[in-house]
Each structure stands twice: as C-alpha cells, then as structure tokens.
Amino acid sequence: MAERFIVGITGGSGAILGVRLLQALKAAGKETHLVISHGGRAVLKHETGMDLDDVRSLADHWHGHDDLFAAVASGSFRTAGMAVAPCSMKTLAGIAHGYADSLLLRAADVCLKERRRLVLVTREMPLSLIHVENMRAVTLAGGIILPPVLTFYTGATTVDGLVEQVVGKVMDALGVDGFAYPRWK
C-alpha cells in the first residue's frame, strides 16, 4: 500500500502551492486525501482559475470540508502525515488551540495527537504576536511551520521556480524523497 498523505488547502493566498504539492505527491507514488476549506475554494478559483473539480482530479480521494465522518478524521485511519498549503492564520489558530470544528482542522488535530507529521505552509506578513504565539504552540505540539519564504540562492527567476523550491521543502518536511528541486551545494 502506498503511503497516505492529507493535503489541506485554505483561504490563505498561495493556492498554487497546494495544487503543486498534490502533483508532486502523485508523481512520487503517494496516496493523497484532499480537504479544501470554503475560503480555499474561493482563493483557488481567484488565483489559479481552477475550480473544485479541477483540483479534486489531482487527488486520490477528496473529503468535504464539513464531513467530520470522513476517514481522515480518525486516528485509526493511518497516514504518513499532512500538509496545509497554504495555511491561513485562521486555520493556524484553530490548529494551535485544538478548535477542530471542520474536517481540515480535525485531520490536523489527529496528526498532532497521533504524533504524525504536520506541515503548515503559513501565509501572512507581517506577523502579529498572536500569529507568532500560535506558530509556537503548533511547534511545541510537534507541527512544522514552513512559511513560503523566497530563496534566491537557487537562481530561480520565475514564480514557478519559487513555487518548486517551497514544494520541495514541504516534500522534505513530509519525508518524501525523489522531488528534484535546486539545493544548496
């Protein structure tokens, strides 16, 4: 059986990061379970022109944001981890404080309680103290905060090149090998 990963897409800017992550996980032969927040759908359409069906086709399984009976809501449904890309500050706050009132938040909560990898590609700047404290809380609980920070040592000259760098870092944080992106030599 292939390793399973959950991919969450929220209403933070940067929906292409979640789309590209789904593509990379599929190329690596991983099983993917997709959850998109209501805000994530709107941002996805605005930023990429893609609708829910377009993105659903990239995942092996799709679960409705409000479906708290979905498999990924249970710790007995084993996964290798979850990435939320992009992760809005609202979603970060919910995860940091265990406010699991949606499937995306519940799946993240399950990853933390089961000590599975949870990677949050947080999207906001500048950061308030509340944001930093929420990032601290998630980090202390075992999550990985991975903001899509621009890196220039790779020589990327396009947005696509910068997206590839971020997706590569997420794949590394999830423990998935084989994704080629420029690394420091």
Image (tube, helix red, strand yellow):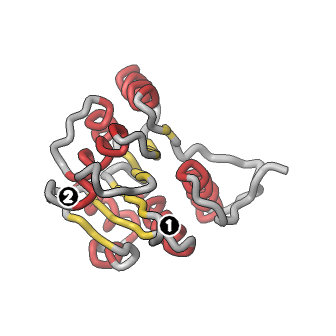
Question: Which corner quadrant of the image does residue 109 belong to?
Answer: top left
Q: Earlier in the sequence, mark 1 or mark 2?
A: 1
Name the residue at 49% across, 73% down. Answer: 26
Which callout, 1 or 2, points to the residue nearer the camera?
A: 2
Q: Would you name the residue on which mark 2 appears?
A: 65
In this picture, is 108 found above or below 178?
above
What's the mark number on residue 115? none
In this picture, is 117 found above or below 49?
above
Residue type for callout 2: His
Name the residue at 51% across, 67% down. Answer: 25
Name the residue at 19% across, 61% down. Answer: 70
Looking at the rendered structure, the secondary structure element under dot 2 is: loop
In this picture, is 83 found above or below 89?
below
Using a 10 Å C-alpha cutoff, classify the residue at mark 1 as few (fewer than 14 neighbours), some (14 to 19) or many (20 or more).
Answer: some
Q: How far from the left and from the top, in percent, is residue 36? A: 28, 60
What's the mark number on residue 20? 1
In this picture, is 9 found above or below 127?
below
Q: How far from the left and from the top, in percent, is residue 105? A: 26, 45
Q: Nearer the viewer, residue 6 or 123?
A: 6
